[in-house]
Image (spheres, helix red, strand yellow):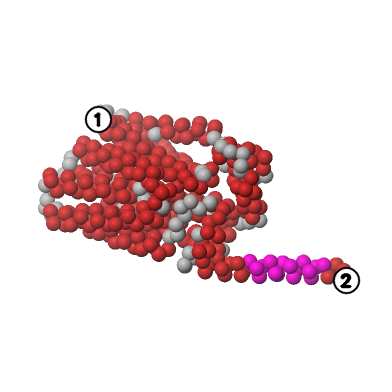
Amino acid sequence: MLQLRILACLLLEEFLLGCGVGFANQAVPLFLSEIAPTRIRGGLNILFQLNVTIGILFAELVNYGTNKIKGGWGWRLSLGLAGIPALLLFFGAMIVVDTPNSLIERGHLDEGKAVLRKIRGTDNIEPEFLELVEASRIAKEVKHPFRNLLMRRNRPQLVISIALQIFQQLTGINAIMFYAPVLFNTLGFGGNASLYSAVVIGAVNVFSTLVSIYSVDKVGRRMLLLEAGIQMFFSQVVIAIILGIKLKDHSASLAHGYGILVVVMICTFVSAFAWSWGPLGWLIPSETFPLETRSAGQSVTVCVNLLFTFVIAQAFLSMLCHMKYGIFLFFSGWVVIMSFFVLFLLPETKNVPIEEMTERVWKRHWFWKRYMDEDEFVEAGVELEKKEQINGSEAASKL
């Protein structure tokens, strides 16, 4: 009976934790994209991912330390310490201001203008303020944002956001991060050494995210994603070759030199992911949706991301047991596919204001512009139909 109560408490804790993570992933990238100046929007938004990687590193360090505590208290302490960042997030949310977009959309024009003046540090905010007011006016006309997401003009943003979340998980990063201790133990490093190796990966993750913060607004989103695709493909193929040649079914572990090489290649893979698909998978959706569908679009983005995180996490161990070294070839194949997707279908959004994405990005893209052109024709037809209805009602009233 006691065990059932403990299990119920753990399940409730996981449910509430999942809700909190979902809410944070929904709100934080949008908040950062809406308050950031255009020229540094990418780097400022990636601070979210940087704090995620720092949290992962601290979690690995806590797990490494609590693993040595005897008497069954180690895992309890590890879970309990997770409440500290949650409290920091709660109290931090109490002191931050709403974004100008949110305030204007809710009718608080003066307050929104004051916040915009404060975060920009200048009184010359009238053009940007008028753009936000116009975007808010258009957004208020949308009564069903989720239904509006399926409209033709929003299809490019929706497709790209969903694809980025699926591809982000199919790089294999969460499989490696979740099961790094298991993976390194399989490679023969032992229990403590595997936790130590996981801490090393966490540190690589943090420092590589700093590279993304520095470079994303200089070289652009596409360049980081394409370079990382080459680096991730190379590292995974090397890992697959080493494991395929040296690790036989009857072998308990790799030779020491080969094991170190595998760890180096995994760190190479993690570094590539940390300055590309990790942060940009959240940045690009948060800056491409128009205001009227931004919250709904980000909700779909988070939902798809967490769904595929769950699927890959559940499937990885079984895939590793059955496919062995082939698991890395599986993920490297997906890296090739997603790199071609970026090359041909993902437009560059560097230094483009959010309110101007449609005119400067989507209507100029070789493939996605066809959705914008036809949508304009449809909108013109709707406006004509409304005018005809108005004229007809005026004529009827005169009669």
Q: Magenta stretch: residue 35 in it? A: no
Q: Quadrant of residue 397?
A: bottom right
Residue type at mark 1: give it: Lys
Question: Where is mark 1, residue-wise?
Answer: 68
Q: In the rendering, which numbered label is found on residue 399? A: 2
Residue at 46%, 42% in the rendered image: 44
Residue 117: x, y in percent? 60, 39
Is residue 156 shown above or below 294?
A: below
Along the line of sight, the residue nearer the viewer: 93 or 277: 277
Residue type at mark 2: give it: Leu
Q: Is residue 30 left or right of residue 2?
A: right
**Majority secondary structure in the magenta region:** helix
Residue at 36%, 41% in the rendered image: 210
Q: Specify which label sits upstream in the sequence, 1 or 2.
A: 1
Secondary structure, mark 2, is loop
Quadrant containing the C terminus is bottom right
Q: Is residue 394 left or right of residue 17?
A: right
> How many numbered callouts?
2
Is residue 320 shown above or below 56?
A: below
Residue 118: x, y in percent? 58, 36
Magenta span covers which residues?
379-394
Q: Residues within 10 Å of mark 1 (few under 14, many from 20)?
A: few
Residue 128 visible in rendering: yes
Residue at 47%, 61% in the rendered image: 159
Contact between marks 1 and 2 (CB within 8 A): the answer is: no
Quadrant containing the N terminus is top left
Residue 301 visible in rendering: no
Residue 11: x, y in percent? 41, 41
Residue at 45%, 34% in the rendered image: 86
Secondary structure, mark 1, is loop
Q: Is residue 99 left or right of residue 10?
A: right
Q: In the rendering, which numbered label is found on residue 98? A: none
